[in-house]
Image (spheres, rainbow, N blue to C red):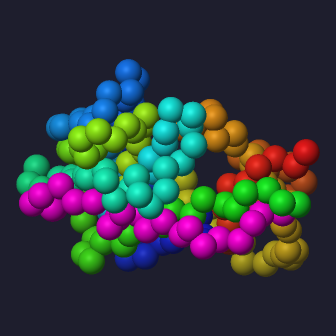
Amino acid sequence: MTPNNIKNNMTERPQWNVKRLINATLVAGYQSLGSELQLETDAPFRMVGVAVYLFDADNKPIGAAGNVRTTIRFTRPDGSWIQKHLISAQGLNPYDAGAPNGAVGNRPSFYAYFAPLGTNVLYPAGASIQIDLQVVAGDVLAQALVVFIGTKLFPAGVTWAPTYPPKYAARPYFGYNIQILGADLPVLNVPFQVAPDADFAWEHGQQTDSCPMP
């Protein structure tokens, strides 16, 4: 994934907007209706997908059963609901329970995938997204992260958007990584430090969750 794509006099950058919903008292059948996620004011947001991450009281991810029994819906820029009714989070967030065991016998990674939207939704700068989330009666959910993935669209020239020089020498480099503890989630604005010896162009990356090595 390139950090900047310039198309039609526009700079497009990846953006993840996250809303955290907390059931602090662990009420069974928790619901949060009309919760608002305020978008940033510097550029419009083009939403391409959505995912829902659910956690129990021990900060452990809830698998397929919990996803099925948690329902959600959210709004378009004009305030109308994309889904008329609350639908199962499992429909937005397929859960892969068939992963093999991790390295040195650790548990497998928790795979939670973004569901792509059939049609991208464009939110103006400074717009908000309303979210309804409801858990089936009797079930207990400690917290949910609702994540909207997409891009921010900047007019050319208004934001930092460097290009490659006419002549340069490139060398492959795979040395950068960032580790975040699951117990600390959500973690925002994590610095990504680049070594001062050369410019670095981010072309692609990968993410996984796994237990730390003993």
Residue 71, x across and y down, in percent? 26, 52
Q: Where is residue 111, by image quadrant?
A: bottom right
Q: Quadrant of the C terminus?
A: top right
Residue drawn at (49%, 42%) of the image: 55
Query: Left or right: where does residue 209 sit relative to residue 11?
Result: right
For the question of whether residue 159 can be seen, the reply is no
The vertical placement of 41 against 175, above or below, is above
Q: Quadrant of the N terminus?
A: bottom right
Residue drawn at (34%, 41%) of the image: 139
Residue 134, x across and y down, in percent? 24, 43
Residue 40, x across and y down, in percent? 35, 42
Please identify the residue farthest to the front as the structure is shown: 138
Q: Which residues are magenta?
A: 82-103
The number of discs equals 0
Please identify the residue farthest to the top as the structure is shown: 25
Query: Left or right: where does residue 113 sit relative to residue 214?
Result: left
Residue 161, x across and y down, in percent? 55, 60
Q: Tell whether position 96 is magenta.
A: yes
Residue drawn at (84%, 60%) of the image: 105
Q: Nearer the viewer, residue 182 or 78?
A: 182
For the question of whether residue 27 can be seen, the reply is yes
Residue drawn at (25%, 46%) of the image: 136
Q: Tell whether position 33 is magenta.
A: no
Q: Where is residue 110, by image quadrant?
A: bottom right
Q: Nearer the viewer, residue 123 or 22?
A: 22
Q: Nearer the viewer, residue 69 or 36?
A: 69
